[in-house]
Amino acid sequence: MTLRNKGVRRGAARLVAACLLAAGLVGTVPAAAETGAPGERPASAGGPVVVPVQTSGPAERRFNLVFMGDGYTAGEMPEFRADLERHLNTLWSVEPFASYRSYVNVWAVEAPSAESGVDCDPGLDAPARDTVLDMGFWGGCDPGSVQRLLTVDGRKAAALADLVPGTSAANRQVVALAHSSTYGGAGGGYATASGGNALSALITPHELGHSLGGLQDEYDYYARGVPGGTYSGPEPASAHHTLLSEGQMREQRAKWWRWLGEESESGGVIGRYEGGLYSTAGVWRPSRHSLMKTLGYAFDQVEREVMVRAIAAKVNLVQDHTPNAAPIGADRSVWVDVLHPVGGELAVTWRLDGRALDTRGARTVDLRGLRLSPGPHLLTATVTDPTPFVRDPAVRVSEALTRTVRWTVDPSVVTARGPSGAAFTGHTPTGSPVGARSVVHADTTHAVDGTPAVRWHLDGRPVATGDRNDRDLDLGALRIAPGTHVLTARLAGAGRLAGTGQELRWTVDARPVTAAYELSEPLRTVRRPGRPVEYVYDGAFTMRLTARDDREGAVVSRFRVDGDGWYTYYGWPTDADAPFRFSPGGTVIDGLVYGKLGRSRAVPWDDATPDHGTHTVEYRAVDAAGNEGPVRSFLVTLVPPRG
């Protein structure tokens, strides 16, 4: 929600976030060392300490998420670390962050506060606290604001972020966590979230939608509990709001016309749903519910495409290449090093004088076999992200998803030969298991005579990458059997390109994570052959989901009702340790509705008619390696109460 005023406190202007919150690894590491292990914290005399939490590459070449806490005293710093871990576990389970995690470095700036907690929490009459970031609810203790607007002093946040070497405003995003169990957050130049609320880990991706992607809220209210009225403005600039009909979108090729009619990632189908931009009528959004409307659901396809571009725009797909400042000879190999998304491979197309070369994705082309005629030639390598998350050609050809490197090739130039020892230069981290559907990569040194090959083996058996790009191996294409496996990458070559016996080794976790449910006592339980177990209730009931994995790391559980969108299980909004509560009409908490069985209901003015009858509840879990467990289900029959 866009704010219309600024809160001022203690004579200092606060940063006021642009948007109001109202709704509800795998990466590249240098071959020499895997840095950034959580828990490795330099000694401190009480001042701020920069802790690398996830290192996927040099800070200058990555998108850097910089987390900092406010209102955590020195003795409470372990709570900040636990809150941060919980927020990250949820973030990595949300697309597109899951697929592009390898583009991201994560840093924690640990700066103890003198006092515990933040200002005006939970009310305006709460005492002010002496904290490092001067965070506060009510828009910085502004009586004209709302409680859940959690702001931060931007100057102080920037000063702490500047302590992270290699980062700048251009390649980082600050997320400030408040030491509070009160629901709240904000998006804008600086994203904020309460650290310890049951829903707080879902606040972070929502606020990054604002701060990083420029997405707008899809709420149909400004103040909770008060319908927002009818929208009266022009066609919104927002990518996921419109005044157009579906027919007009198709005719004009406008807004989300490319996604219309497809099953939504957040439930239902992509279409035209009334309400958004704080209005209940007169403006439409793409999906019934999404992360920008209701915490717990996914970004829908329209929002996800925006977020892919936003993340990719923070990095360069081409990480390094054969120098091109001067003409190069035709007596050598030319190469590019590219990024490696966890969710897929980048495509590389080589062209000579505009003609495509048959390189089939190779990162290296040997000019010696092309027999070039005298005179200059133009060689190009175009790197593109072919992700299915993007359909807009303008996004696909933007610098975020397409980069081209150019060389002038002059056959009269003689290339000097130098050292060409083969070695790995970067790879997917080996310190933790990789998922059975992830893409694993290994980069190597280069020489003018060529690039050493990488040979992959799974449990000792050779496996092929499928094309001439031997830097990436898509484990999902191998259909690995359930269990634990060993993946290795070895250098191969001869003569000047011979390796030194180097080998990389990963544990592949292909064992599905399992989830289980526990329900409150039903009226009766029905078991029929060939059908899931059915539980009969005449009113509210509770469900607790638990997940179990054979390896360390967080597990995120999800459920859905009657085939609607998958919803992240977090306990209950007022207590993360309490089970989720389903009821015929839902439960109203602070102006929002949770747990209506059947057709979803987000706000009190949505239809509260009980959906009596039988409903299917499905559940599953995803583990720290990104493996999704099997989908299982049970039935719930809701009958009218007697009398």
Image (spheres, rainbow, N blue to C red):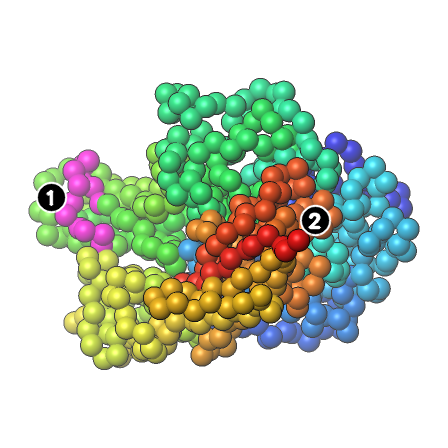
Q: Callout 1, which amino acid?
A: Leu
Let me know if residue 442 is in the magenta part.
Answer: no
x, y percent for residue 245: 45, 23
**What is the secondary structure assignment of the residue under circle 2?**
strand
- Helix, strand or loop for the magenta stretch, by majority: loop
- Residue at figure coordinates x 20%, y 77% from the top left: 461
Residue 40, picture quadrant: bottom right
The image position of residue 448, as x and y in percent, is 23, 58
Q: CA distance from mark 2 to mark 1?
A: 73 Å
Question: How many C-alpha atoms fall within 10 Å of the one at disc 2: few (<14), some, or many (≥20)?
Answer: some
Q: Secondary structure at mark 1?
A: loop
Look at the picture and state if 107 lies above or below 504. above
Tell me the residue at 23%/80% (across/down). 460
Q: Decide: is 341 above or below 73.
A: above
Left or right placement of residue 419 versus residue 550 in this view: left
Residue corresponding to mark 2: 588
Q: Amino acid at mark 2?
A: Val
Tell me the crowding category of disc 1: few under 14, some 14 to 19, or many 20 or more residues within 10 angstroms, Cα based. Answer: some
Residue identified by numbered label 1:
372
Q: Are discs 2 and 1 less than 8 Å apart at CB? A: no
Relative to residue 395, is residue 227 drawn left or right?
Answer: right
State the residue at coordinates (52%, 54%): 567
The stretch in magenta equals: 350-362
